[in-house]
Amino acid sequence: MKVNVRFFSSLREQLGFSVYVHETGSETVSQLRSELMGLNPLFAEVLAHGKAIRMALNQEVCQDTALLSEGCEIAFFPPVTGG
Amino acid sequence: MSWEVRIQTGDFDLSHEIAQLRSGQFQVGAVCAFVGTVRDRNSGDQVATLELEHYPGMTEKSIEQMMHDAHNRFDIISSKVIHRVGVLNPSDQIVLVAVTSAHRGESFQACEFLMDYLKTQAPFWKKESGPQGSHWVDARISDDQAMAKWGIVSQNALPNELN
């Protein structure tokens, strides 16, 4: 299925782009993250496990077990610092 | 019960926003407003500019959820959140949270609740620039701790993954 992956803040900056449309075989957000990390060293570094990365599915904060669906929007970003 | 969320690059006028918020609301007896502004120093570093990024769509949804919670939790009449994005300079206004209620206690509390919530849950990110270079601002544990007094567990600033 095709999914839209978005990156914000320092993750966007490190990658050099903010949107990545991806044909995925993953079922969950966690699997998608691992799949992206396997694509190239840059994804592997930016999305490395253990870092403070938050995730959202269809614009709501989610757990890494959240299920993907056709055309869904997944976002990866660092802790928020607004206000 | 009404609320409004605006994300904008431009400045806002506090008097105008409050007048609009309580216009025609004759049951209002209290208005509480918080304005956050850009400091010229943060953690010892001089700040020349502050750049704010956000997640369009999710930002509005998350703040609307906070306002919904605030209206459920406190006996308030109306609320408004304005958050600026883009490049800001020291002394610029960043954020407005304004709440009305019949009596002062509820609007004081709801205003603080909304600000605490916004700090830890709304998808905004700050980048500071100054003589020492640019860096993304770190989330603060103290902001998560502020959420505890509302009975809400927040782990935004944890330096690792949450799952």
Image: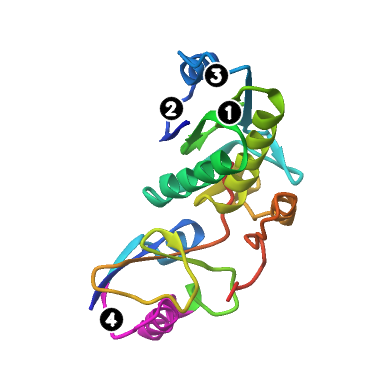
Element type at marker 4?
Answer: loop
Is residue B69 magenta-colored?
A: no
> Label 1: which residue?
B99
Mark in front: 2 vs 3: 3
Q: Gap in Å between the C-alphas at discs 2 and 3?
A: 13 Å
Q: Gap in Å between the C-alphas at discs 4 and 3?
A: 48 Å
> Label 3: which residue?
B14
Numbered tag placed on residue A24 in the rendering: 4
Element type at marker 1?
Answer: strand
Element type at marker 3?
Answer: helix
Q: Gap in Å between the C-alphas at discs 3 and 1?
A: 12 Å
Numbered tag placed on residue B10 in the rendering: 2
The subunit letter for the residue under badge 1 reads B
Q: Give the range drawn in magenta.
A: A22-44
Label 3, residues with CA under 10 Å away: few <14, some 14-19, many ≥20: some
Residue A77 drawn at (x, y percent): 49, 62
Residue B79 drawn at (x, y percent): 52, 31
Q: Gap in Å between the C-alphas at discs 4 and 1?
A: 45 Å
Nearest the eye: B51 or A59: A59
Count of residue discs = 4
Residue type, mark 2 in image: Gly
Nearest the eye: B144 or B139: B144
